[in-house]
């Protein structure tokens, strides 16, 4: 009977866990809808703005060129790792840490590589082996364009002051609830826009006022929008990854609970059979 009690306790524990993971799945599904709508609505604007300004910046020459398009020898690199503040999201956070370390140890090997983290999980792990100049773990408590723009402005200052020669964003791009794509996206310097065929595109526009003035005003806005889009993408990916992870956890808990129930029923049937045999055996002993 002690064995039956142990199995009953395990069934109760697994059932409790299943209720928790099921509730977390539903919460993430509700949050995912809002985050997905936000990033889906933002992407066309952000992509078109980036495409336009990349082309404009590349077409400027001499003094009119933007300081954010300055292609110089890369000796100091800043990786901006965007993760989340909470776990229970499968490989969502670990993939960002793994990609960041891979870039530091292979792609930028021999160069000074520092990190700026957005999200507690990346900060906790990368801080053990890498130099983190800043962390912005509280950004998700009040996610807004204004708060992200402050981080983007700081990144622009670090680049324009010459403290870093290249700044790269590492984040999860949202594709669907079950799929997130690890992105390695250059933030600064601004790259010239290339068509799908790989050729540099110089778009033909009429500018009013001058092209240089438009670029100088809109490039900071474009960079802020680019970072905000990356954070939005990461947030939607987080909810999608957590919903998927909790769905799988619920399915696994359901399967384990059913297995334990079958095991319990078999053990209970065996115990009843043993009791019947003992009663029959006792009765036969009395008759003899």
Image (cartoon, grey):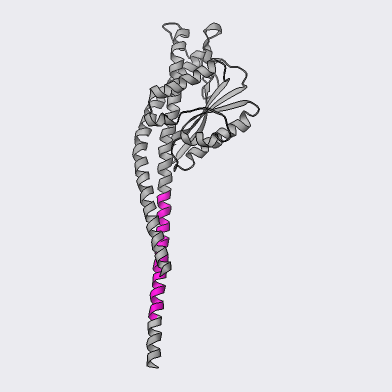
Look at the picture and state if 180 lies above or below 16.
above
Residue pictured at 37% horizontal, 40% vertical: 28
**How many numbered marks does the figure carry?**
0
On the image, the x and y values in percent for residue 150 come to 43, 21
Image quadrant in which the N terminus is located: bottom left
State the residue at coordinates (55%, 8%).
61
Does the magenta run of residues contain 267? yes
Q: Position of residue 245 (x, y in %)?
A: 43, 45
- Point out the residue furthest to the right here: 110
249 w.r.t. 177: above or below:
below
Residue 237, position as x, y percentages in the image: 43, 36
Magenta stretch bounds:
249-276
Looking at the rendering, which quadrant does residue 108 occupy?
A: top right
* Residue 50 visible, this orientation: no
Does residue 287 belong to the magenta stretch? no
Q: Is residue 50 above or below residue 40?
A: above
Q: Position of residue 18 (x, y in %)?
A: 38, 52
Comparing 56 with 235, the one in front is 235
Q: Is residue 58 above or below residue 278?
A: above
Horizontal arrangement in the rendering, residue 159 relative to residue 109 (left or right): left
Residue at 43% in and 39% down: 86
Q: Is residue 85 left or right of residue 189?
A: left
Q: Quadrant of the C terminus?
A: bottom left
Residue 19 appears in the rendering: yes
Q: Residue at x 41, y 34 (%)?
A: 236
Q: Main secondary structure of the magenta part?
A: helix
């Amino acid at each position: 009977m002690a064995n039956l009690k142990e199995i009953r306790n395990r069934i109760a524990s697994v059932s409790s866990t299943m209720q928790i993971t099921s509730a977390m799945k539903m919460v993430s599904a509700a949050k995912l809808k809002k985050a997905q709508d936000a990033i889906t609505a933002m992407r066309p604007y952000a992509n078109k703005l980036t495409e336009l300004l990349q082309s404009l910046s590349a077409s400027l020459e001499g003094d009119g060129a933007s300081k954010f398009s300055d292609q110089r020898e890369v000796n100091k690199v800043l990786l901006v790792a965007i993760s989340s503040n909470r776990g229970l999201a499968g490989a969502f956070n670990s993939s960002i840490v793994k990609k960041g370390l891979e870039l530091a140890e292979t792609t930028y090997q021999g160069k000074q590589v520092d990190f700026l983290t957005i999200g507690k999980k990346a900060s906790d792990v990368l801080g053990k082996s890498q130099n983190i100049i800043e962390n912005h773990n509280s950004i998700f408590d009040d996610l807004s364009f204004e708060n992200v723009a402050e981080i983007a402005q700081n990144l622009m200052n670090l680049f324009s002051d010459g403290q870093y020669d290249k700044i790269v964003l590492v984040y999860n791009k949202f594709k669907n609830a079950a799929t997130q794509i690890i992105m390695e996206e250059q933030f600064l310097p601004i790259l010239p826009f290339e068509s799908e065929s790989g050729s540099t595109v110089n778009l033909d526009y009429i500018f009013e006022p001058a092209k240089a003035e438009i670029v100088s005003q809109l490039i900071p806005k474009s960079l802020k929008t680019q970072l905000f889009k990356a954070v939005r993408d990461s947030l939607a990916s987080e909810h999608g990854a957590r919903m998927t992870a909790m769905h799988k956890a619920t399915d696994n808990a359901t399967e384990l609970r059913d297995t334990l129930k079958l095991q319990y029923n078999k053990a209970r049937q065996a115990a009843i059979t043993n009791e019947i045999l003992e009663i029959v055996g006792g009765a036969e002993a009395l008759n003899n």
